[in-house]
Amino acid sequence: MNRTHVTFLSMGIVAAALAVLAPAASAQDADFPPPEVIATLTPTYFEGHAAYWYHDHWHYRDARGAWGFYHDEPAFLRDRRAARPVDRHFYTTGHSVFHGGRR
Amino acid sequence: MFIHMAIDTLGAPPEKKAQLDKIQSDLFAALAPARDAHRALLSTLADGVAAGNVDKTKVDAAVAKVQTASAGVHAATIDALNALYKALSPEERAALMDKVKAHAAVWKKVNADEDPASKDKGSHLAKLTETLGLTSDQADKISAALKQGAPPKPDSAALDSHLTALETAFTSPTFDAKTLATANAANGYIAKNGTARMVRFYETVTPLLTPDQRTKLADHLRKRLNDRHATASTPATTP
């Protein structure tokens, strides 16, 4: 399974990404879920971590705390996504922070 | 409150639902004094907005009660936090901490980082403009008033330190919430800065609204009294 590991400044709005293992990380690779998505999106647990479907990839935090994503969608996660719609909650009425996070 | 909110989207397996519902219910009950104090503040602000003059003495008293209540939050939630730790697997604990940090980041963005005078899309003032149908002249005047004498961005060290300590403790092989010495300072930071920004917003905005707009805004505030998560730690305390 081809994975890309990156460092993600998770408390910021802008993610700073540093490709470590991937031979060629593009700008698209740095597109990690922002806090408002992590806060409100229900993850799927796989390989010992929570995985979040965001911008057409499954993202997760590895044991070192670095954010990464699966380049190729694992069959388990693909099946879960097909079987169950991504569950996204939102903050209270009138709150306008959340617009990110394609399903 | 961030932990209570984080459980909503944790995605734990169905067999843990009853247990987590019970823990969430216990957390909700433990947060009642803080929630009630925040609702009282919202109610005081709504009365002031409707009357066209936010009563500073009443508001200060309500703010003091929010801060007092926040000081009791950690002690009241210790048992529920310990039960939550036991109920979760290591990966669920890590995910919960990611969510807590994410909720805190959103809170900081809305309540501390955002320019209070901003009229950008998604800002408090933009939302107010949309909700009340403010004229561009009103929005400009409110923005200028919010900019004048705006307090400096608060130092979030107390919250940041607590988030680090909480994550370290909650993802360790053992956990006892009693040992979290940073919790009260973090809760105090949220209560103090969340309420201060909210109060300043309504104090500033109210004299610049028409009577109809004040009525509408007061109604909007009163609707928030029914918000299940209505405490100083909810991300948006303005429209």
Image (cartoon, rainbow, N blue to C red):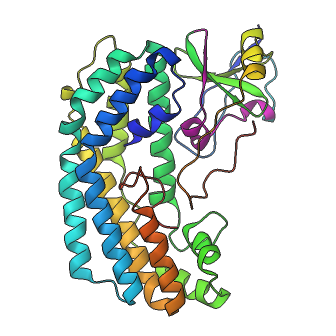
Q: Position of residue B127 (x, y in %)?
A: 60, 69
**Position of residue A89 measured from the top left corner of the image (x, y, whole percent):** 59, 41
Image location (x, y in percent) of residue B156: 37, 50
From this view, report whether residue B79 is shown above or below residue B67: above
Say which of B159 and A84 sits in front.
A84
Residue B207, quarter of the rendered image: bottom left
Considering the image in quadrants, where does the N terminus of chain A appear?
top right
Q: Is residue B147 left or right of residue B131?
A: left
B63 versus A70 height, above or below: below
Q: Which residues are magenta?
A: A28-47
Q: Residue at x 81, y 30 (%)?
A: A26
In the foreground, B36 or B120: B36
The reply to whether the magenta stretch includes residue B139 is: no
**Residue B88 in the figure: left or right of residue B130:** left
Q: How many marks?
A: 0
Residue A63 is left or right of residue B58, and the answer is right
Residues A94 and B18: in front is B18
At x 76%, y 34%, the residue is A55
Say which of B40 and B194 sits in front.
B40
Q: In the rendered structure, does residue A41 fall within the stretch colored magenta?
A: yes
- x then y, percent, for residue B53: 35, 88
| Residue B135 in view of the camera | yes
